[in-house]
Image: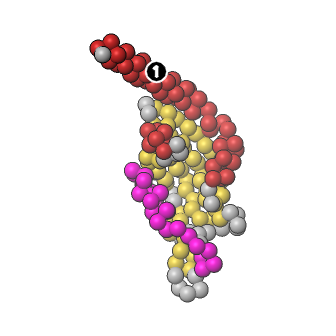
């Protein structure tokens, strides 16, 4: 029985060491290759736009990874309605998106820790019945899920919008 317990503990030890080495390898590779993401701006945006219900335009994209915090920096970010590219939903001069690595790995999808944006403009439109809504979002003919939007924003630890204008 004692021998079986020792074999089990040794297996757990080897498994833990293997997982630790694989995590360290992933972080090291991420730290090395993540800064090159800015050089592949068009391909990166194509992947992002394919998963979002609105269009995204960026004049410049840079990436940095320090510690366990990969960060994307976007210059002149513009979110626009997919059905009407002339309709700007949100624009920002400089945007920082910090990815929460641990929560992203546990949920098998990207999770943000921090969003910081400067010179933000958020567009609103008034419906025929006098209600205001964010431009490009669901109107009278379409159904939106406000709970999903609220949950997505509540999952972000910090949101900082500096010099914000509602237009």
The part of the image, by quadrant, that contains residue 67 is: top left
For the C terminus, give its image quadrant: bottom right
The extreme front residue here reads 1
> Which of the 4 image quarters holds residue 150?
bottom left
Q: Whole-percent x and y of residue 132? A: 52, 78
Q: Is residue 133 left or right of residue 159?
A: right
The residue under label 1 is: 18
Q: In the image, 124: left or right of 81?
A: left
Residue at (59% x, 65% y) in the render: 89
- Residue 108: in magenta span: no
In the image, 108 versus 36, the foreground residue is 108
Quarter of the image containing the N terminus? top left
Q: Which residues are magenta?
A: 139-164
The residue that appears at 52% across and 43% down in the rendered structure is 108
Q: Position of residue 64 (x, y in %)?
A: 52, 35
* Residue 158 visible within the image: yes
Q: Is residue 61 left or right of residue 110?
A: right
Q: Secondary structure at mark 1?
A: helix
């Amino acid at each position: 029985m004692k021998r079986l317990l020792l074999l089990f503990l040794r297996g757990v030890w080897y498994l833990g060491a293997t997982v630790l080495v694989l995590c360290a390898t992933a972080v090291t590779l991420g730290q090395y290759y993540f800064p090159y993401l800015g050089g592949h701006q068009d391909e990166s945006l194509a992947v992002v736009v394919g998963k979002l219900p609105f269009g995204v335009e960026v004049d410049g994209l840079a990436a940095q990874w320090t510690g366990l915090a990969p960060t994307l920096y976007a210059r002149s970010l513009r979110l626009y309605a997919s059905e009407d590219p002339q309709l700007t939903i949100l624009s920002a001069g400089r945007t920082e998106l910090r990815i929460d690595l641990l929560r992203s790995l546990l949920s098998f999808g990207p999770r943000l820790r921090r969003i910081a944006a400067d010179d933000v403009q958020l567009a609103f439109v008034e419906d025929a019945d006098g209600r205001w809504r964010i431009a490009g979002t669901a109107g009278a003919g379409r159904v939106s899920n406000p709970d999903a939007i609220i949950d997505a924003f509540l999952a972000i630890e910090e949101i900082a919008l500096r010099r914000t204008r509602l237009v």
